[in-house]
Amino acid sequence: MQSVKIKSALISVYYKDRLEPLVELLKQHNVTIYSTGGTQTFLEEQGATVVAVEDLTAYPSIFGGRVKTLHPKVFGGILHRRDNESDISEREKFEIPPIDLVVVDLYPFEETVASGASEADVIEKIDIGGISLIRAAAKNFKDVLIVSSRDQYDAVVELLQAKDGATDLEDRKRFAAKAFDVSSHYDTHIFNYLNANGEEEVFKQSLRESTPLRYGENPHQNGAFYGKLEDLFEQLNGKQLSYNNLVDVDAAVALGAEFEEPTVAILKHTNACGCATADTIKEAYLLALSSDPVSAFGGVIIANRKIDLSTAEELNKLFFEVLIAPEYDADALELLRSKKNRILLKQKPVELPNKLFKTLLNGVIEQDKDLATETEADFKTVTKREPTAEERKALVFAAKVCKHTKSNTIVLATDKMMFSSGVGQTSRVDALRQAIEKARSFNFDLSKTVMASDAFFPFPDCVEIADQAGIKAVVQPGGSIKDQDSIAYCDAHNMAMVMTGVRHFKH
């Protein structure tokens, strides 16, 4: 493997922290260091002898620092091929010194966007010189080592210590790959910022942080999560989240976001098997559990209020995989930690993306997040009988749960709790029958419930079955050419029906 002893380095970084060990190592190996501005000052404070890039190029930094390193003597020193006689001749003719190591990071573009800064400030954080240096050094990895992030400092110090200030071709190629990851990630975020209105219909995403998972949906499948889970959750206890855990946690977070009053939802395979609101989080949990205590076993639970000791005592009676809450009292946390594998997540107030995507066939599909949530103001009564005030509240609750349940779906609920649901069925009739049978198996009085459907009724059979079960109020999107048949049946049987005009398919 082609070994290259590092004799010269260009260092120009935005972040100076964690750089000291590398500087000390370069000093020990008598490496000639070139630098600019604030980095030069920092290096000299570390006792390094530094050649200013302005002295190398005989040209000052101009335009407020926008142009510092963009010069043939800098890029020629990086890009010339050490085994090419013509390149060597030109380098000597123009007195271009070789540069064996480039240490550069980029202006904090993502961080500036996240801070809510003005467009002018964001644009100033689009790096030109740094990104060019990274690409140049990475392209010429045959001869040059590129260090493109402060996260790589420890690794490069370890490498140079082990190889007495030299690198092999495989080392340089590996760091070049890291560099193009840095540059492509950076450019992706710039593009998505400038293309926020979506005029350019292309798909670009870059998620660099990865967490290996125990396996995918099944043990024979590999799995990984790409993203920053720590931005959304602090894990307080338990084993590593699995692929299936994460899918259910995602569904739980989406459903939990629909409610402002104290609410608990229990999910299995992304569908709620229990969901309730109450005056206290403990009451909400007990109501949610009563919906289906059988399915709740091994589920994912989300609460939108602090978990206190009395609630924890009830939760501790159930085997569940994951509990999500915004806060935990210390004594509640201590009790819940008694099961070492139980995953406890503290949810942070983070705004989630409004675009959803997933791989499909040989590509990716993307869509806007379903942000439509119907309130009573969105209900259009289409029957002679208006829903009562209590029924209208129940219809709102049922519609929220229905929105987050796999299609075809029917949800039966009161204004405080979901009684049952029929989920993922190939017909809406099957979904309704499943919901009714399930509710009856737990001895629920269906005359106290309302029905929500994620999509329209193509025939009046669903309202007929619901009526026979004692259900007297229905919410659905409407839009079928046979809507009037369902309306006519409701009118003939003193049922109330409202339409929203918004379908909530979920696949």
Image (cartoon, grey):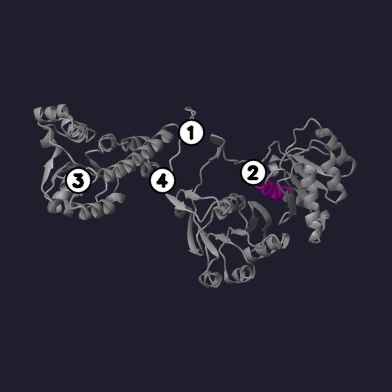
Q: Earlier in the sequence, mark 3 or mark 4?
A: 3
What is the number of the mark on residue 373?
A: 2
Q: Residues within 10 Å of mark 2 (few under 14, many from 20)?
A: some
- Whether residue 90 appears in this view of the structure is yes
Does residue 155 appear left or right of residue 282 in this picture? left
Query: Which residue is painted at 62% across and 56% down in the image?
Result: 261
Q: With respect to residue 49, does 300 lie above or below?
A: below
Residue matched to label 1: 203
- In this picture, which residue range is highlighted in magenta? 395-405
Cα–Cα span, label 4 and label 2: 33 Å
The amino acid at mark 3 is Thr
Does residue 66 appear left or right of residue 375 in this picture? left
Residue matched to label 3: 39
The spot of residue 242 in percent (x, y) is 53, 56
Query: Which residue is painted at 47% across and 27% down in the image?
Result: 200
Cα–Cα span, label 1 and label 2: 27 Å
Q: Earlier in the sequence, mark 4 or mark 2?
A: 4
Q: Nearer the viewer, mark 1 or mark 3?
A: 1
Residue matched to label 4: 208
Q: Nearer the viewer, mark 3 or mark 2?
A: 3
